[in-house]
Image: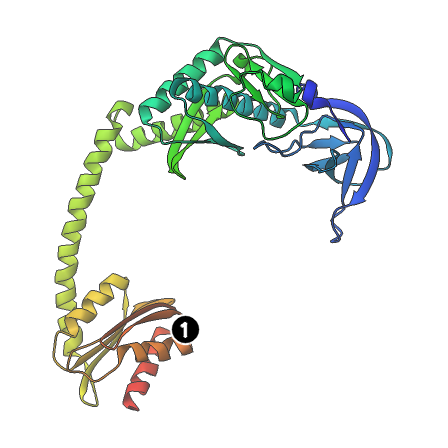
Amino acid sequence: MTERIYYRDPYAFEFDATIVAIEPVSNDGDGRRGVVLDRTAFYPTSGGQPFDVGSLGGSKVVDVIDQDDGAILHIVEGDLTAGPVHGTVDWNRRFDHMQQHTGQHVLSAAFDRLFDVRTMSFHLGSTTSTIDLAREVSAAEMARAESEANRVVWQDRPVTIRFATAAEAANLPLRKEPTREGVLRIIEIDEWDVSACGGTHVARTGAIGIIAITASERFRGGTRVEFVCGGRALEAFRKLRESVASSTRLLSVLPSEMPAAIERLQAEGRDLTKHVKVLHAQLATHEAAALAANAETIGPMKVVLAALDGWDAGGIKALATAITARPGHLAVLMTSPAPASIVVARAADAGADCAAILRRLTSRFGGKGGGRPELAQGGGLTGDVQHMLAAVRSDLSGV
Protein backbone atom coordinates (compact mmCIF):
# COMPACT_ATOMS: atom_id res chain seq x y z
CA MET A 1 0.00 0.00 0.00
CA THR A 2 1.31 3.43 -0.95
CA GLU A 3 1.56 6.17 1.68
CA ARG A 4 -0.44 9.14 0.40
CA ILE A 5 1.36 12.34 1.28
CA TYR A 6 -1.40 14.50 -0.19
CA TYR A 7 -3.86 13.09 2.36
CA ARG A 8 -2.25 15.13 5.13
CA ASP A 9 -0.37 17.79 3.20
CA PRO A 10 -1.94 18.77 -0.17
CA TYR A 11 0.58 21.62 -0.44
CA ALA A 12 3.50 19.16 -0.70
CA PHE A 13 4.56 19.12 -4.33
CA GLU A 14 8.13 17.82 -3.95
CA PHE A 15 9.02 14.63 -2.13
CA ASP A 16 11.49 11.77 -1.90
CA ALA A 17 10.40 8.18 -2.17
CA THR A 18 11.55 4.68 -3.09
CA ILE A 19 10.52 2.86 -6.25
CA VAL A 20 9.28 -0.56 -5.12
CA ALA A 21 7.98 -1.91 -8.45
CA ILE A 22 8.18 -1.19 -12.17
CA GLU A 23 5.92 -2.88 -14.70
CA PRO A 24 5.16 -2.47 -18.42
CA VAL A 25 1.79 -0.90 -19.19
CA SER A 26 1.60 -1.44 -22.97
CA ASN A 27 3.09 -3.54 -25.73
CA ASP A 28 3.29 -0.87 -28.41
CA GLY A 29 6.81 0.26 -27.58
CA ASP A 30 5.80 3.75 -26.43
CA GLY A 31 8.29 3.65 -23.56
CA ARG A 32 5.69 3.98 -20.84
CA ARG A 33 6.11 2.18 -17.53
CA GLY A 34 3.98 1.74 -14.44
CA VAL A 35 5.85 2.75 -11.29
CA VAL A 36 4.80 2.02 -7.70
CA LEU A 37 6.37 4.04 -4.87
CA ASP A 38 6.40 3.47 -1.13
CA ARG A 39 5.00 7.02 -0.71
CA THR A 40 3.72 9.66 -3.10
CA ALA A 41 2.37 13.21 -3.35
CA PHE A 42 0.76 12.46 -6.73
CA TYR A 43 -3.04 12.41 -6.59
CA PRO A 44 -4.73 9.63 -8.64
CA THR A 45 -7.99 10.16 -10.49
CA SER A 46 -10.73 9.74 -7.89
CA GLY A 47 -13.96 11.31 -6.63
CA GLY A 48 -14.48 13.49 -9.69
CA GLN A 49 -10.97 15.01 -9.48
CA PRO A 50 -8.36 14.28 -12.19
CA PHE A 51 -4.86 13.00 -11.52
CA ASP A 52 -1.74 15.07 -10.96
CA VAL A 53 1.10 15.25 -13.47
CA GLY A 54 4.78 16.07 -12.98
CA SER A 55 8.03 14.10 -12.91
CA LEU A 56 9.78 11.23 -11.17
CA GLY A 57 13.53 11.54 -11.51
CA GLY A 58 14.02 12.46 -15.15
CA SER A 59 10.79 10.82 -16.31
CA LYS A 60 7.48 12.51 -17.04
CA VAL A 61 4.40 11.38 -15.07
CA VAL A 62 1.43 11.32 -17.48
CA ASP A 63 -1.20 9.45 -15.45
CA VAL A 64 -1.77 8.30 -11.87
CA ILE A 65 -4.04 5.36 -11.08
CA ASP A 66 -5.50 4.25 -7.74
CA GLN A 67 -5.33 0.45 -7.72
CA ASP A 68 -7.63 -1.92 -5.86
CA ASP A 69 -4.83 -3.18 -3.56
CA GLY A 70 -4.19 0.33 -2.20
CA ALA A 71 -1.09 0.95 -4.30
CA ILE A 72 -0.85 3.99 -6.58
CA LEU A 73 0.47 3.35 -10.08
CA HIS A 74 2.37 6.21 -11.76
CA ILE A 75 2.41 5.99 -15.56
CA VAL A 76 5.74 7.46 -16.65
CA GLU A 77 7.51 8.10 -19.94
CA GLY A 78 11.16 7.10 -19.67
CA ASP A 79 13.40 4.62 -17.89
CA LEU A 80 13.58 4.32 -14.13
CA THR A 81 15.19 1.79 -11.85
CA ALA A 82 14.18 0.53 -8.43
CA GLY A 83 15.49 2.60 -5.54
CA PRO A 84 15.39 6.21 -4.35
CA VAL A 85 13.70 8.81 -6.55
CA HIS A 86 12.71 12.46 -6.28
CA GLY A 87 9.19 13.45 -7.33
CA THR A 88 7.82 16.81 -8.37
CA VAL A 89 4.10 17.51 -8.82
CA ASP A 90 3.00 20.16 -11.34
CA TRP A 91 2.00 22.78 -8.76
CA ASN A 92 -0.07 24.97 -11.08
CA ARG A 93 -2.32 22.03 -12.00
CA ARG A 94 -2.47 20.83 -8.36
CA PHE A 95 -3.40 24.24 -6.97
CA ASP A 96 -6.01 24.74 -9.69
CA HIS A 97 -7.61 21.43 -8.69
CA MET A 98 -7.44 22.43 -5.02
CA GLN A 99 -9.29 25.68 -5.78
CA GLN A 100 -11.99 23.96 -7.86
CA HIS A 101 -12.55 21.07 -5.46
CA THR A 102 -12.75 23.21 -2.33
CA GLY A 103 -14.99 25.63 -4.23
CA GLN A 104 -17.27 22.71 -5.02
CA HIS A 105 -17.60 21.87 -1.33
CA VAL A 106 -18.50 25.47 -0.53
CA LEU A 107 -21.01 25.77 -3.39
CA SER A 108 -22.64 22.38 -2.75
CA ALA A 109 -23.03 23.27 0.93
CA ALA A 110 -24.69 26.56 -0.07
CA PHE A 111 -27.35 24.74 -2.11
CA ASP A 112 -27.79 22.23 0.70
CA ARG A 113 -28.06 24.81 3.49
CA LEU A 114 -30.24 27.32 1.65
CA PHE A 115 -32.58 25.04 -0.28
CA ASP A 116 -32.00 21.50 1.02
CA VAL A 117 -30.81 20.45 -2.44
CA ARG A 118 -28.25 17.66 -2.45
CA THR A 119 -25.30 17.36 -4.81
CA MET A 120 -25.49 13.94 -6.48
CA SER A 121 -22.17 14.04 -8.36
CA PHE A 122 -19.18 16.26 -9.11
CA HIS A 123 -16.86 16.45 -12.12
CA LEU A 124 -13.70 18.56 -12.30
CA GLY A 125 -12.98 19.24 -15.98
CA SER A 126 -10.00 20.83 -17.68
CA THR A 127 -11.68 24.25 -18.05
CA THR A 128 -14.88 24.10 -15.99
CA SER A 129 -16.39 21.93 -13.27
CA THR A 130 -19.94 20.71 -12.73
CA ILE A 131 -22.18 19.57 -9.91
CA ASP A 132 -25.41 17.66 -10.52
CA LEU A 133 -28.18 18.73 -8.15
CA ALA A 134 -31.04 16.47 -7.10
CA ARG A 135 -33.79 18.79 -8.34
CA GLU A 136 -34.26 21.65 -10.73
CA VAL A 137 -33.23 25.00 -9.27
CA SER A 138 -34.23 28.45 -10.48
CA ALA A 139 -31.94 31.23 -11.66
CA ALA A 140 -32.77 33.14 -8.48
CA GLU A 141 -31.78 30.17 -6.31
CA MET A 142 -28.50 29.77 -8.18
CA ALA A 143 -27.70 33.46 -7.75
CA ARG A 144 -28.41 33.30 -4.03
CA ALA A 145 -26.31 30.14 -3.57
CA GLU A 146 -23.48 31.72 -5.54
CA SER A 147 -23.55 34.85 -3.35
CA GLU A 148 -23.64 32.84 -0.14
CA ALA A 149 -20.76 30.63 -1.30
CA ASN A 150 -18.62 33.66 -2.07
CA ARG A 151 -19.42 35.16 1.31
CA VAL A 152 -17.86 32.06 2.87
CA VAL A 153 -14.88 32.32 0.52
CA TRP A 154 -14.20 35.94 1.44
CA GLN A 155 -14.48 35.22 5.15
CA ASP A 156 -11.30 33.14 4.68
CA ARG A 157 -12.49 30.30 6.87
CA PRO A 158 -10.04 27.51 7.77
CA VAL A 159 -10.26 24.21 5.90
CA THR A 160 -9.02 21.31 8.04
CA ILE A 161 -8.24 17.64 7.45
CA ARG A 162 -8.87 14.90 9.99
CA PHE A 163 -9.55 11.18 10.04
CA ALA A 164 -12.48 9.40 11.67
CA THR A 165 -13.63 5.85 12.20
CA ALA A 166 -17.07 4.82 11.02
CA ALA A 167 -18.37 5.17 14.58
CA GLU A 168 -16.90 8.65 14.94
CA ALA A 169 -18.18 9.70 11.51
CA ALA A 170 -21.69 8.62 12.50
CA ASN A 171 -21.73 11.46 15.02
CA LEU A 172 -20.50 14.08 12.56
CA PRO A 173 -22.86 16.39 10.61
CA LEU A 174 -21.73 15.01 7.25
CA ARG A 175 -23.38 16.72 4.28
CA LYS A 176 -23.56 13.39 2.45
CA GLU A 177 -23.48 9.77 3.56
CA PRO A 178 -20.03 8.24 2.88
CA THR A 179 -19.83 5.57 0.17
CA ARG A 180 -16.87 3.69 1.64
CA GLU A 181 -16.22 1.90 4.90
CA GLY A 182 -13.32 2.02 7.34
CA VAL A 183 -11.40 5.10 8.39
CA LEU A 184 -12.68 8.20 6.59
CA ARG A 185 -10.80 11.34 5.62
CA ILE A 186 -12.89 14.30 6.69
CA ILE A 187 -12.66 17.78 5.12
CA GLU A 188 -14.19 20.45 7.34
CA ILE A 189 -14.83 24.06 6.37
CA ASP A 190 -15.25 25.96 9.61
CA GLU A 191 -18.94 26.23 10.56
CA TRP A 192 -20.01 25.55 6.98
CA ASP A 193 -19.38 22.04 5.65
CA VAL A 194 -18.23 18.62 6.81
CA SER A 195 -17.65 16.01 4.10
CA ALA A 196 -15.83 12.71 3.70
CA CYS A 197 -13.46 13.32 0.79
CA GLY A 198 -10.10 12.07 -0.47
CA GLY A 199 -9.36 15.06 -2.74
CA THR A 200 -6.88 17.89 -2.38
CA HIS A 201 -8.08 21.17 -0.87
CA VAL A 202 -6.79 24.64 0.01
CA ALA A 203 -6.02 25.44 3.65
CA ARG A 204 -8.39 28.44 3.84
CA THR A 205 -11.44 29.36 1.78
CA GLY A 206 -9.87 32.69 0.79
CA ALA A 207 -7.46 30.77 -1.47
CA ILE A 208 -10.45 29.78 -3.63
CA GLY A 209 -10.58 33.42 -4.75
CA ILE A 210 -14.07 33.48 -6.21
CA ILE A 211 -16.77 31.02 -7.26
CA ALA A 212 -18.65 31.91 -10.44
CA ILE A 213 -21.55 29.90 -11.92
CA THR A 214 -21.11 30.03 -15.70
CA ALA A 215 -24.01 27.90 -16.98
CA SER A 216 -26.76 25.46 -16.02
CA GLU A 217 -29.03 22.94 -17.69
CA ARG A 218 -31.70 20.42 -16.83
CA PHE A 219 -30.14 17.01 -16.28
CA ARG A 220 -31.80 13.73 -15.26
CA GLY A 221 -34.63 15.41 -13.40
CA GLY A 222 -32.32 17.85 -11.65
CA THR A 223 -29.93 20.63 -12.60
CA ARG A 224 -26.34 20.45 -13.81
CA VAL A 225 -24.49 23.57 -12.64
CA GLU A 226 -21.24 24.59 -14.32
CA PHE A 227 -18.83 26.75 -12.35
CA VAL A 228 -15.25 28.05 -12.19
CA CYS A 229 -13.12 29.12 -9.24
CA GLY A 230 -9.98 31.15 -8.65
CA GLY A 231 -7.63 31.34 -11.62
CA ARG A 232 -10.23 29.80 -13.91
CA ALA A 233 -12.71 32.51 -12.96
CA LEU A 234 -10.13 35.18 -13.80
CA GLU A 235 -9.46 33.57 -17.18
CA ALA A 236 -13.21 33.31 -17.88
CA PHE A 237 -13.61 37.00 -17.03
CA ARG A 238 -10.78 37.96 -19.38
CA LYS A 239 -12.37 36.03 -22.25
CA LEU A 240 -15.76 37.59 -21.52
CA ARG A 241 -14.20 41.06 -21.37
CA GLU A 242 -12.48 40.54 -24.73
CA SER A 243 -15.68 39.22 -26.28
CA VAL A 244 -17.78 42.11 -24.99
CA ALA A 245 -15.17 44.68 -26.06
CA SER A 246 -15.01 43.23 -29.58
CA SER A 247 -18.79 43.09 -29.83
CA THR A 248 -19.30 46.67 -28.67
CA ARG A 249 -16.73 47.88 -31.20
CA LEU A 250 -18.46 46.02 -34.02
CA LEU A 251 -21.92 47.22 -32.99
CA SER A 252 -20.79 50.74 -32.02
CA VAL A 253 -22.72 50.57 -28.76
CA LEU A 254 -22.01 50.60 -25.05
CA PRO A 255 -21.95 47.23 -23.22
CA SER A 256 -25.31 47.99 -21.60
CA GLU A 257 -26.80 48.62 -25.06
CA MET A 258 -25.71 45.27 -26.53
CA PRO A 259 -28.94 43.30 -25.88
CA ALA A 260 -31.06 45.96 -27.63
CA ALA A 261 -28.58 46.17 -30.51
CA ILE A 262 -28.62 42.40 -30.99
CA GLU A 263 -32.42 42.34 -30.86
CA ARG A 264 -32.52 45.06 -33.52
CA LEU A 265 -30.12 43.14 -35.76
CA GLN A 266 -32.17 39.96 -35.34
CA ALA A 267 -35.34 41.79 -36.38
CA GLU A 268 -33.58 43.29 -39.40
CA GLY A 269 -32.23 39.84 -40.28
CA ARG A 270 -35.70 38.28 -40.15
CA ASP A 271 -37.10 41.03 -42.38
CA LEU A 272 -34.22 40.61 -44.81
CA THR A 273 -34.71 36.83 -44.91
CA LYS A 274 -38.38 37.27 -45.77
CA HIS A 275 -37.49 39.72 -48.52
CA VAL A 276 -34.83 37.38 -49.93
CA LYS A 277 -37.33 34.52 -50.01
CA VAL A 278 -39.74 36.62 -52.04
CA LEU A 279 -37.00 37.64 -54.47
CA HIS A 280 -35.73 34.06 -54.62
CA ALA A 281 -39.20 32.82 -55.53
CA GLN A 282 -39.51 35.45 -58.24
CA LEU A 283 -36.08 34.56 -59.62
CA ALA A 284 -36.92 30.87 -59.53
CA THR A 285 -40.10 31.48 -61.52
CA HIS A 286 -38.20 33.48 -64.13
CA GLU A 287 -35.27 31.02 -64.30
CA ALA A 288 -37.63 28.03 -64.46
CA ALA A 289 -39.40 29.54 -67.47
CA ALA A 290 -36.05 30.04 -69.24
CA LEU A 291 -34.92 26.49 -68.49
CA ALA A 292 -38.25 25.00 -69.56
CA ALA A 293 -38.08 26.92 -72.84
CA ASN A 294 -34.86 25.04 -73.65
CA ALA A 295 -36.04 21.62 -72.51
CA GLU A 296 -34.91 18.58 -74.49
CA THR A 297 -37.46 16.18 -75.91
CA ILE A 298 -36.65 12.64 -74.79
CA GLY A 299 -39.35 10.18 -75.66
CA PRO A 300 -42.71 11.57 -74.57
CA MET A 301 -41.21 13.99 -72.03
CA LYS A 302 -39.77 17.48 -72.01
CA VAL A 303 -36.55 17.12 -69.98
CA VAL A 304 -34.54 19.88 -68.32
CA LEU A 305 -30.98 18.77 -67.49
CA ALA A 306 -28.92 21.54 -65.90
CA ALA A 307 -25.98 22.22 -63.58
CA LEU A 308 -26.41 25.59 -61.89
CA ASP A 309 -23.73 27.75 -60.29
CA GLY A 310 -24.70 29.86 -57.27
CA TRP A 311 -27.78 27.82 -56.34
CA ASP A 312 -28.13 25.71 -53.23
CA ALA A 313 -30.21 22.59 -52.62
CA GLY A 314 -33.27 24.60 -51.62
CA GLY A 315 -32.96 26.81 -54.70
CA ILE A 316 -32.78 23.98 -57.22
CA LYS A 317 -35.75 22.31 -55.54
CA ALA A 318 -37.77 25.50 -56.03
CA LEU A 319 -36.70 25.60 -59.67
CA ALA A 320 -37.57 21.95 -60.24
CA THR A 321 -41.00 22.45 -58.66
CA ALA A 322 -41.68 25.43 -60.92
CA ILE A 323 -40.52 23.57 -64.05
CA THR A 324 -42.59 20.47 -63.35
CA ALA A 325 -45.75 22.50 -62.83
CA ARG A 326 -45.82 22.25 -66.64
CA PRO A 327 -47.41 19.07 -68.07
CA GLY A 328 -45.03 16.42 -69.37
CA HIS A 329 -41.87 17.92 -67.85
CA LEU A 330 -39.03 16.20 -66.01
CA ALA A 331 -36.30 18.21 -64.29
CA VAL A 332 -32.86 16.94 -63.23
CA LEU A 333 -31.04 19.84 -61.62
CA MET A 334 -27.64 19.81 -59.91
CA THR A 335 -25.56 22.35 -58.06
CA SER A 336 -22.08 23.09 -59.38
CA PRO A 337 -19.25 22.42 -58.74
CA ALA A 338 -19.11 18.94 -57.20
CA PRO A 339 -19.75 17.51 -54.70
CA ALA A 340 -23.20 18.23 -56.07
CA SER A 341 -26.66 18.37 -54.63
CA ILE A 342 -29.38 17.06 -56.93
CA VAL A 343 -33.14 17.26 -57.35
CA VAL A 344 -35.11 15.01 -59.70
CA ALA A 345 -38.77 16.00 -60.17
CA ARG A 346 -41.52 15.26 -62.66
CA ALA A 347 -44.95 16.48 -63.61
CA ALA A 348 -47.88 14.31 -62.59
CA ASP A 349 -48.37 13.05 -66.16
CA ALA A 350 -44.67 12.28 -66.84
CA GLY A 351 -43.71 8.64 -66.80
CA ALA A 352 -40.29 8.70 -65.13
CA ASP A 353 -39.44 7.32 -61.68
CA CYS A 354 -37.41 10.06 -60.00
CA ALA A 355 -36.24 7.87 -57.11
CA ALA A 356 -34.95 5.25 -59.55
CA ILE A 357 -33.07 7.88 -61.57
CA LEU A 358 -31.39 9.13 -58.40
CA ARG A 359 -30.46 5.62 -57.26
CA ARG A 360 -28.73 4.89 -60.56
CA LEU A 361 -26.80 8.15 -60.32
CA THR A 362 -25.61 7.63 -56.72
CA SER A 363 -24.56 4.06 -57.53
CA ARG A 364 -22.21 5.46 -60.19
CA PHE A 365 -21.11 8.78 -58.72
CA GLY A 366 -21.43 8.32 -54.96
CA GLY A 367 -23.42 10.45 -52.59
CA LYS A 368 -26.74 9.53 -51.10
CA GLY A 369 -30.39 10.47 -51.23
CA GLY A 370 -33.87 9.17 -51.76
CA GLY A 371 -37.44 10.11 -52.40
CA ARG A 372 -40.58 9.13 -54.25
CA PRO A 373 -41.36 8.49 -57.92
CA GLU A 374 -42.48 12.11 -58.33
CA LEU A 375 -39.63 13.79 -56.39
CA ALA A 376 -36.19 12.70 -55.18
CA GLN A 377 -33.29 14.61 -53.62
CA GLY A 378 -29.68 13.81 -52.84
CA GLY A 379 -26.22 15.19 -52.28
CA GLY A 380 -22.52 14.43 -52.22
CA LEU A 381 -22.28 13.28 -55.84
CA THR A 382 -18.71 13.52 -57.13
CA GLY A 383 -17.34 13.83 -60.62
CA ASP A 384 -17.87 16.22 -63.51
CA VAL A 385 -21.45 17.50 -63.32
CA GLN A 386 -21.82 17.61 -67.09
CA HIS A 387 -20.70 13.98 -67.26
CA MET A 388 -23.34 13.09 -64.66
CA LEU A 389 -26.06 14.90 -66.62
CA ALA A 390 -24.96 13.10 -69.77
CA ALA A 391 -25.38 9.82 -67.92
CA VAL A 392 -28.96 10.79 -67.07
CA ARG A 393 -29.61 11.72 -70.71
CA SER A 394 -28.26 8.37 -71.88
CA ASP A 395 -30.27 6.53 -69.24
CA LEU A 396 -33.51 8.25 -70.26
CA SER A 397 -32.88 7.76 -73.96
CA GLY A 398 -32.48 4.05 -73.45
CA VAL A 399 -35.80 3.71 -71.70
Q: Secondary structure at mark 1?
A: loop
Q: Quadrant of the N terminus?
A: top right
The one nearer the camera, 159 or 384, is: 159
Count of numbered marks: 1
Rendered location of residue 35, percent (x, y): 78, 37
- Along the viewing direction, whichever of 126 and 384 lies nearer the viewer: 126
Question: Vertically, is 90 above or below 191?
Answer: below
Q: Is residue 206 above or below residue 254?
A: above
Q: Which residue is mark 1?
A: 383
Does residue 26 appear in this view? Answer: yes
At 12% from the left and 80% from the top, the residue drawn is 327
x then y, percent, for residue 9:
69, 18
Asked whether, in this view, residue 46 is left or right of residue 303, the answer is right
Q: Quadrant of the C terminus?
A: bottom left
Residue 97 placement: quadrant: top right
In this rendering, would 345 be left or right of 172? left
Q: Amino acid at mark 1?
A: Gly
Q: Is residue 291 left or right of residue 59?
A: left
Where 228 falls versus 81 (above or below)?
above
At a point 15% along the width and 62% down the height, the residue shown is 283
